[in-house]
Image (spheres, coloured by chain):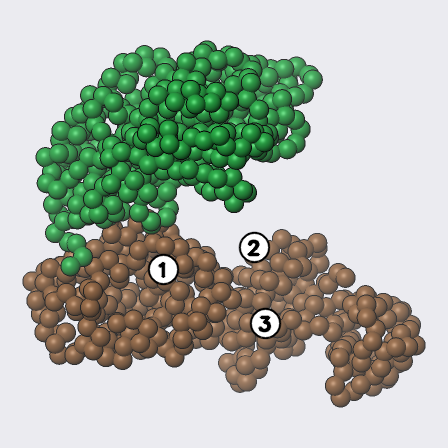
Chain colours: A green, B brown
Amino acid sequence: MEEVYLDNSATTRAYECVGELVKKVMCEDYGNPSSMHAKGVAAEQYIKEAKETFAKLLKVKEKEIFFTSGGTESDNLALRGAAWANQRAGKHLITSAIEHPAIINTMRHLEEEGFRVTYLPVDRYGRVRLDALKEALCEETILVSIMYVNNEVGSVQPIQEAAGIVKAYNKNILFHVDAVQGFGKYRIYPKKLKVDLCSISGHKIHGPKGSGILYIGEDVKIRPIVFGGEQQKNVRSGTENVPGIAGISLAARTIYQDLDVKVAQMRRLKQRFIKGVSQIEDTTIHGLYDETSAPHIISVGFAGIRSEVLLHALEEKGIYVSSGSACASNHPQVSGVLKGIGARQEFLDATLRFSMSEFTTPQEIDYTLDTLYNIVPKLRRYTRR
Amino acid sequence: MRYHTFLIKYGEIGIKGKNRYLFEDALVRQVRFALKDVDGEFNVYKSQARIYVDCNEEYDYEDAVEHLKRVFGIVGICPVVRMEDQGFEQLKKDVTAYMDEAYPDKNLTFKVEARRARKSYPKNSMEINCDLGEAILDAFPETKVDVHHPDVMLNVEIRREIYVYSQIIPGAGGMPVGTNGKAMLLLSGGIDSPVAGYMISKRGVGIEAVYFHAPPYTSERAKQKVVDLARIVSRYAGPIRLHVVNFTDIQLYIYDQCPHDELTIIMRRYMMRIAEHFARKDGCLGLITGESIGQVASQTMQSLAATNDVCTLPVYRPVIGYDKQEIVNISEKIGTYETSIQPFEDCCTIFVAKHPVTKPNIDVIRRSEEHLSEKIDELMKTALETVEIIEVK
């Protein structure tokens, strides 16, 4: 096989139709949506259309959709924007210990700015502990942020229960969901979940990099974090990334076509892969792997093989995967998430993440398994003595 | 101020007797190479035992100086203002204006040093010195003349045009690359080997390099890092032919057959053999390594002797007596440090023993290598045949 791409939680291949549309917007409908002439109006149409799309998919209002440069900016705007706008009500924030760096590092920065942050522990399957959430809530709490699907082990968080607990304690506390790994796999309805802020990224759903969405409930007070020409109701200044917005919108519409069929297919492949990989000695699957876990992420520990070595050995066979999470893997540090779920020491530096998309085929899964059967025993022969 | 020409001063070239033209031609070549990526048109030529760079069109002065500062063989770079000869009265005005613009603070001592390449000029050098000095003193009464230790040495050269300069920007020193043959650098991704390459190149030696790649234990990024390092060194050393050798199978075979604590030494002996093979093939006259005595287990005196044992070409180790910090200082100066410290594993550290031998005995090592006799020739052959060559410039 030429190329087996199993790193879809890092990024995805864009849909052909998205690539074509982005090019058309860049080269033909290239107007500035703020311009008064027809060229500007044509560009503005794409923004209107995208708002309609996301309003419909999320069952929210169009005016609650904001466009950003991606998941990281959406998370920053949600946390920094909401924390600063609501600090008079208190300076306490809550998140989980297994969030993406876009959340964790933003929280750390807010701590430096005088906010107090509680990091909730998770159970051994990587789900945030609701009892800890109940304990952490206090009068000072203004914002809770929990991810929908964990990017490293694929655990699905009990968002509805968590938001229920938070709102029952104090309905004014804002609830943010980082849905970067969840959107396009799950139908997410912020209002039903009692969620006030929700981040989505374009390139995880076969859309363009540099495109993202932040849902901001209409009653939510938010302070901008970038300043400029007061576009998007002055919440997010800067000329809108029209090609990216057109692209993320088309990607969302496309991924929602037959979504249930696509997800069911991924689940079948996940089970097939888990069954196959379990036949290799001294391996472990991190987190849950039944229906309650994400359909596309499988985190596997291979005792005795450094993840980087196995990753490159797979790469030689045309198979692309991640060690831990791609965002953190530039740093040779051990994954905080694996530690958080209590993974055994021998797996901390020996875990790979396989992540699928709707393009993944049974043949690719079988080829990957065969390759693993072949190279894992060989690599285990040569370890540091 | 707009400078129209650079006068390039060189040092050691001057003493090379009848070979002098070879050195000068090499320097002209290196100056041209250094300026090829700078915005502007540059005319580089030698004339009367000097090298000039004329910049007749618009050009990027700062960038040009930066690039010239990297050329080995240049001792000083003098930015020159060229003036048309419109009579001595006009020259007085022009020189005064030059002083005014170049030295806003006039509280200085100076000396005029005139030279006539065009002997038909109506005044002789002594008269020019006196008369221009007087003009400057008249214009700026706070200046003083000091013929022994002037703050400003104002050079005035009468050629077809008149060349005026007073600044000397220090150059890189050394000798022009290409005047002392070529050598093969064992380039890892670390701090020391790029510095070693730079130092040997400074003495006029062209550089080739060999890097040992060990997939899947070392990544594409580790290789890219070495290419990046070679590119930085090539700014000084000129184009570098980089040999990327796949070393995995040899390494694993040694790991299988030899005592583990000798792995690194034996591995390094095979690296030297491979480096020497390519060195001889391409006409290199020596090997270069970044070794420094005692820095790691494979760089003790005994270990160096054990690795040196397999080489017949001379091995140059320019940082042998340097402390790590001294090497780091040079790598920061030449711009390789930031790249060197990127954290990618290199092939020397993958299977390193917890307690490698620090005092290897050459005879013991040779006997250990006998365990490799069955397959090593074949593995070496494959490694040599599958080399990937990257021309870095």
Marks 3 and 2 share the same chain: yes
Residue A154 pos. (x, y %): 29, 30
Residue A239, x across and y down, in percent:
61, 27
Q: Quadrant of residue B200?
A: bottom left
Front residue (pair B344, B42): B344
Please report, as a chain letter, where disc 2 is located: B
Q: CA distance from mark 2 to mark 1?
A: 26 Å
Q: Nearer the viewer, mark 3 or mark 2?
A: 3
Q: Residues within 10 Å of mark 1 (few under 14, many from 20)?
A: many
Is the C-beta separation of discs 3 and 2 under 8 Å?
no
Q: Earlier in the sequence, mark 3 or mark 1?
A: 3
What residue sits right under mark 1 in the picture?
Answer: B189
Q: Mark 2 is on which residue type?
A: Asp
Q: Secondary structure at mark 3?
A: loop
Q: Which residue is mark 2?
A: B37
Q: Residues within 10 Å of mark 3 (few under 14, many from 20)?
A: many
Residue plotted at (23% across, 41% down): A343
Q: Select label 2 or label 1 by which is in front.
A: 1
Label 3 belongs to which residue? B171
Asked whether the residues under marks 2 and 1 belong to the same chain, the reply is: yes
- Tell me what residue is drawn at x 51 percent, y 75 percent: B175
Question: What's under tag 3, amino acid-wise?
Answer: Gly
